[in-house]
Image (spheres, rainbow, N blue to C red):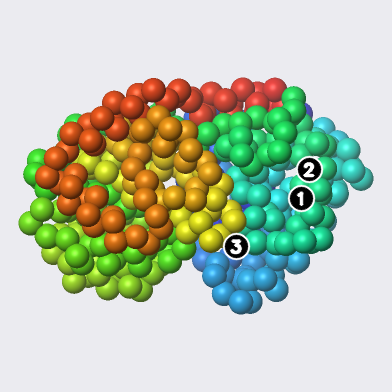
Amino acid sequence: MHRLIVCASVPTMDGRVRMNKLKEVFLNNGIEFLFWGWRREKTEYTTEYPLKHLWTGGGYANKGLLFHYPFWIMSVFFNALKLKKSDKVYAVAFDVALPIYLASKIKGFDYIFDNPDNFSLTYNLKGVTKRFIDNLEKKIAKNALYHIVPDRSRVNEIDEKTVVIPNFPLTSELEKAKVIFKEGKLDNIDIAQLKDDKRLKIYINGRMVKQRGSEWIAKTIEKLDPDKFLFIVAGNVLCDTLNDTIKKSKNVVKFSRMENYKALSLYFCSDLVFAFYDPALPINKKAAPNKWWDCVACGVPFVTNDGIETAKEFVEKEACFQLPYGSDRLVDLLKELERNKEEIEIKKNNLKNFETYNWEHQILKIIKEIT
C-alpha cells in the first residue's frame, strides 16, 4: 500500500488556513498521511496525525531565515529520495515542489503541486532570474499529477493538469460558524452584543501587516466617531501602529488568534470586511485571499483597494467597494455607509451572483484518485 506524504514549510498543518483545511479534509475522510514540516522554532507540537520535522530553526520573519531555506530544500530532497515509487506527495508551494520534483525524477513517485502563491511574484524577482524561476515552476507543474491554484490569474494557460479551486471556506466549518452566531457565544464571550450593536461594524482579520494596509486602517479608526463605528479584530496584528491604535480605542473589540470556523462566525456579526493589499508588491496584484470567498459564503461585502487584478470580477458585479490604496476617501466612504446602509445591502445581494464552491469536495476528488 502506498503512502501519502503532505509537505509544507510550516511546523504543523494547524496554523495557516489552507493547511488547516487540508488537514480537516484528510482527517474527516479517513485519509492516512504523514506530514513533513519545518520546525521554525524550538516548540513542542502535539498533533492528531503523524508528523516529521525535516528541519529546525530560522523562525518566521528575520534576516537569518533566508540562510535556512537552502537547508530546508535539501532536507526535503534527501528525505524524498527515501520514498518508494508507489508513494505520493502533496507538495505545498514552490520551495517544497522544487526538491520533490527533482527527487521524483530519480525515484519515479508521483506528486501534486499545490501552488497558492507564485514564487517569483512573492519575492519580486525580475529579469533573467524571474524568467528562470517561472520556467522552472511551469516544468514542475507540467510534471505533477495535478497543479492546484486558487485563481485563474496565477497561470498563463490552463491545461488538463491545472485545477483552479478558489479559497472558499470548508462547508463543515461554515456550518459550525453559523451555529456559534445563532447561539451568540464564542469561547464564553457574548457575541450577541456584537450582533445587536447598531453601529457600523467592520471586521478586520487575518495577518495584519503594513503591506496589507494596517497603518492605513489605524489612521482610519482614529478618525471615526466611536459612537457610530465598531471595529472587530481577529488574527495576528504584526503592525505596531495598528496595535497601539487597538489598545487605546474604545470602539475596537479584539479577539486573539482562533480556529478558522470561530473567525468565520464573526463575519455574520459584521456589516463590512476590510481586505487591503499594497499594489506596489507584484504578488498583491494577484491576491487570492480567503477572506474574499469567506465574504461570498457569509454574505458580507468587503472593501478593497485599486490595483488588484483579481478583484475585477467583484468590482464588475458590484459586489465590493474599491478605492485607491491609502486614500483618505476610506473615512468618507464609511461615514456615508453609516448614514445610509442601502449600498451595503445592494452589495450583499450582488454577492449571491457568485458561484459557490465545495472546496473539500474538489480536493477530496483529487486525493481519492491517488490513494
- Residue where numbered disc 2 is placed: 138
Secondary structure under tag 3 reads strand
Residue 170 x/y as whole percent: 44, 32
Secondary structure under tag 2 reads helix
Q: Are marks 1 and 2 in contact (CB under 8 Å)?
A: yes
Q: From the image, which quarter does the N terminus lie in?
A: top right
Q: Amino acid at mark 1?
A: Asp
Other-residue count near label 3 (Cα within 10 Å), few / some / many at <14 / 14–19 / ≥20: many
Q: How many angstroms separate mark 3 from mark 1 (CA)? A: 28 Å
The image shows residue 296, relative to residue 243, as above or below, that is: above
User: Residue 343 vs residue 73: left or right?
Assistant: left
Other-residue count near label 2 (Cα within 10 Å), few / some / many at <14 / 14–19 / ≥20: some
Q: From the image, which quarter does the C terminus lie in?
A: top right
Which corner quadrant of the image does residue 315 belong to?
top left
- Residue where numbered disc 3 is placed: 39
Q: Amino acid at mark 3?
A: Arg
Which callout, 3 or 2, points to the residue nearer the camera? Answer: 2
User: Residue 212 vs residue 364: left or right?
Assistant: left
Q: Amino acid at mark 2?
A: Lys
Pick whichever, 152 or 250, lies toward us: 152
Q: Residue at x 33, y 73 (%)?
A: 241
- The mark that comes first in sequence, 3 or 1, is 3
Which corner quadrant of the image does residue 331 belong to?
bottom left
Which corner quadrant of the image does residue 172 belong to?
top left
Q: Is residue 191 visible?
A: no
- Residue where numbered disc 1 is placed: 134
Other-residue count near label 1 (Cα within 10 Å), few / some / many at <14 / 14–19 / ≥20: some
- The mark that comes first in sequence, 3 or 2, is 3
User: Residue 258 vs residue 47: left or right?
Assistant: left
Q: Is residue 244 visible?
A: yes
